[in-house]
Image (cartoon, helix red, strand yellow):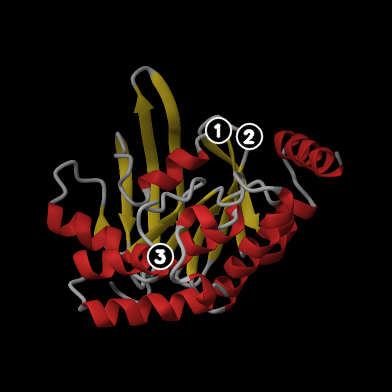
């Protein structure tokens, strides 16, 4: 992929679920090394947009190029799909860890099966990223022995084991108890500081304001407002974004 090409480029994206029009001509781009937060009320299309970025959802119209791969094509080959999934990591609301496998085996599985790494190399990679998220001592335990925050950190480490160029986060803290949110956001902040290209669907406004370079506010399947995260969140121009931030602020106080 050329150095001057955006990590993600999308123009006039359309997405339908039957008669439900979810994404309505969304356009934008995300640059390498940039952290972009996608915010908005439930049902606005933010998670759908994120899932389009690694072809978990296929668009119905428009142009979408991710890490140099054109996802606008309906007949995308398995080769390009595997290449996309190897380079675009995703962390979900739920942790999706294999309960019958230890933490270290959860992390080393994909590098062996997908990237063809040896057992030794994949375990060394797993140990490196487990240490990166501060959980080296949990390598031999099973997921049900971890807290929610620890499970999500393991899920992040698992994605990092594929050594992706882009990381997608779909509300990674929404399933956690409030006291566990900070440990996950700290890992994400460290990744951002290291230059990882990140797209984060989140309700954590402090994270969006403090860590993201830019923010997209979605409303009814369209980009209502976007720009520098601090500027947009400190001085929202649209009435809908003002109302949304007010509700989020009240929820945090409550």
Q: Are marks 2 and 1 in contact (CB under 8 Å)?
A: yes
Label 2 element class:
loop
User: With 83 as the anchor, is 40 left or right in this view?
Assistant: right
Q: In which quarter of the image is the C terminus?
A: top right
Residue 229: x and y, percent?
A: 67, 58
Residue 111 placement (x, y as % from top left)? 27, 70
Could you say which is closer to the camera, residue 112 or residue 72? 112
- Of the pair 29 and 120, the residue shown nearer to us: 120
User: Which of the marked residues, 2 or 3, is nearer the chain's N terminus?
Assistant: 2
Alpha carbons under labels 2 and 3: distance apart: 29 Å
Q: What element carries label 1?
A: loop
Query: Residues at badges 1 and 3 in contact (C-beta under 8 Å)?
Result: no
Q: Which mark is residue 44?
A: 1
Query: Could you tell whether 200 is left or right of 18 in the image?
Result: right
The residue under label 2 is: 41
Residue under label 3: 158
């Amino acid at each position: 992929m050329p150095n001057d090409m955006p990590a993600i480029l999308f123009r006039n994206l359309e997405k339908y679920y039957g008669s439900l029009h979810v994404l309505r001509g969304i356009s934008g781009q995300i640059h390498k090394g940039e952290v972009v937060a996608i915010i908005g009320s439930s049902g606005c299309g933010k998670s759908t947009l994120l899932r389009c970025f690694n072809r978990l959802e296929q668009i119905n119209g428009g142009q979408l190029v991710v890490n140099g791969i054109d996802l606008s094509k309906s007949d995308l080959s398995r080769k390009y799909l595997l290449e996309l999934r190897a380079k675009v990591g995703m962390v979900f609301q739920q942790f999706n860890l294999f309960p019958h496998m230890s933490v270290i085996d959860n992390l080393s599985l994909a590098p062996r099966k997908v990237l063809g790494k040896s057992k030794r190399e994949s375990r060394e990679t797993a140990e490196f990223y487990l240490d990166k998220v501060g959980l080296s001592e949990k390598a031999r335990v099973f997921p049900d022995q971890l807290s929610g925050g620890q499970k999500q950190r393991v899920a992040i480490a698992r994605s990092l084991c594929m050594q992706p160029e882009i990381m997608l986060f779909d509300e990674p803290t929404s399933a956690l108890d409030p006291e566990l949110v900070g440990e996950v956001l700290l890992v994400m902040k460290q990744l951002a500081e290291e230059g990882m290209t990140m797209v984060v669907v989140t309700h954590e406004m402090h994270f969006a304001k403090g860590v993201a370079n830019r923010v997209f506010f979605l409303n009814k399947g369209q980009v209502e407002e976007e720009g520098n995260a601090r500027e947009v969140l400190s001085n929202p121009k649209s009435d809908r974004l003002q109302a949304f931030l007010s509700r989020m602020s009240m929820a945090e106080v409550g």
